[in-house]
Amino acid sequence: MSDSERELGVFTVTIERFADFLLPRALDIKAKVDSGGRFDDFDIEFLENVMVEAEQAKPYLDRHPDLHDLYTRAVSLYHDIVTQAAANETGALIIIPA
């Protein structure tokens, strides 16, 4: 298997995992915190794991600038989730524009 074939395989699995698992779970957590909910241990563990995976994806993204927008939007989603969850913990109201 060539390096480009391997990279394509890794990319395919990564995108499928993002679309099938990570994004839906993140959107569920966002809905939860947007309605005033707080993180539970599973939410925290999930978001920590996602940030580790995002960091591991950076070298691949450096070689594929066409994916920068997707990556940036995903990181922004996680930032919005964490910001709102922190506000929920302190009782502050933060409105994050859509």
Image: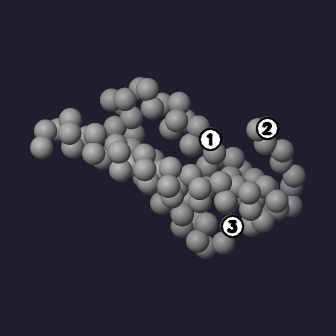
Q: Is residue 65 left or right of residue 91?
A: left
Q: Quadrant of residue 67?
A: top left
Which residue was labeled with disc 1?
Answer: 76
Question: Badge 3 is on which residue?
Answer: 39
SS type, badge 3: loop
Using the rendered image of the protein, determine whether residue 9 is visible from the camera's viewpoint. yes
Please report the residue visible at 87 percent of the width from the left and 52 percent of the height from the top: 93
Q: Position of residue 98 (x, y in %)?
A: 76, 38
Q: Residue at x 86, y 61 (%)?
A: 91
Q: Residue at x 42, y 46 (%)?
A: 15
Relative placement, left or right, of 24 versus 94 is left
Neighbour tally class for label 1: few under 14, some 14-19, many 20 plus, Cα within 10 Å: few
Identity of the residue drawn at 43% across and 26% down: 66
Three-letter amino acid code at disc 2? Pro
Residue linked to disc 2 = 97
Q: Is residue 22 above or below residue 97?
A: below
Q: Amino acid at mark 1?
A: Ser
Residue 79 in percent (x, y) is at 64, 46
- Mark 3 and mark 2 in contact (Cβ < 8 Å)? no
